[in-house]
Image (tube, rainbow, N blue to C red):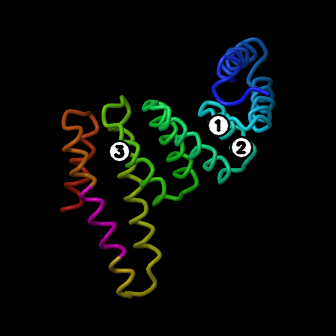
Amino acid sequence: VARGNDLKPVQDEAFQLLDAIERDHGPYWKHRGDLQLVRLGAAVETRNPDLLARTADSLLKQGRPDEALAALDQSIAQAQSARRASDVFALALKAGMIEQRRSRFAEAARRLQQAAIESPREQRAAETHLAAVWNLAQQLREETKSKSSDSSADVESSREISERYVAWLNEHLRLWPSSATCNQVWIWLAAWYE
């Protein structure tokens, strides 16, 4: 049985066939083909980032987001090892958006900010960083709402998140000073200081 890089030509051809299946027969049959490819990848223990990303997609469609995120994390690690920076960024963005949809704002903020900072020249890096800041604001909002007492731990946690929020807004302006996203950052900074 072929392993690792020996499967690359076969996987590339399989991906092309799946795209053709989707074009000719629709997304349902492509999804079924993806499932078969994922099973094949598991059987031969491949760690191809593309196949792992497809595994994550399949797991998401099955309503298994924790397992999908684990597959995405493996895919990110493999793409990093292969020095595929654009793939690392795209996969990290996808993982962050999964966390955002699950209202896990702290984790979404962390993932999105890290993706943007590690790949600041990516086309969507500024938007990704802005999404990280938004998620951090949601975390702060939840933290503030859920406070039932004025314990010092709650106050400290809110203060740390607040400081990080302002730091990330300033970080955004420093890293992407000519991005269209800066207008939103200036609005958020003004509202914060107001």
How packed mark 2 is, by other alpha carbons closer than 10 Å (few <14, some 14-19, many 20 or more), is: some
Mark 1 and mark 2 lie on one chain; the one further toward the N terminus is 1
Q: How many neighbours does mark 1 have within 10 angstroms: few (below 14), some (14-19), or many (20 or more)?
A: some
Q: Secondary structure at mark 1?
A: loop
Whole-percent x, y for residue 134 in the image: 38, 52
Question: Which residue does the numbered mark 3 point to in the structure image?
Answer: 129
Task: Report crowding for label 3: few under 14, some 14 to 19, many 20 or more residues within 10 A (C-alpha).
Answer: many
Which kind of residue does numbered mark 3 sit on? Answer: His
Position of 182 compared to 112: left or right? Answer: left
Q: Quadrant of residue 143?
A: bottom left
What percent of the width, then of the height, locates residue 97? Answer: 52, 45
Magenta part, dominant SS: helix
- Mark 1 — residue? 47
Q: Is residue 181 magenta?
A: no
Q: In what quadrant of the picture does the N terminus appear?
A: top right
Bounds of the magenta segment: 157-167
Marks 2/3: CA distance?
Answer: 26 Å
Q: Name the residue: 35% across, 52% down.
A: 133
Residue 160 within the magenta-colored segment of the rendering = yes
Residue 169 locus on image (x, y percent): 25, 52
Question: Position of 174 compared to 12: left or right?
Answer: left
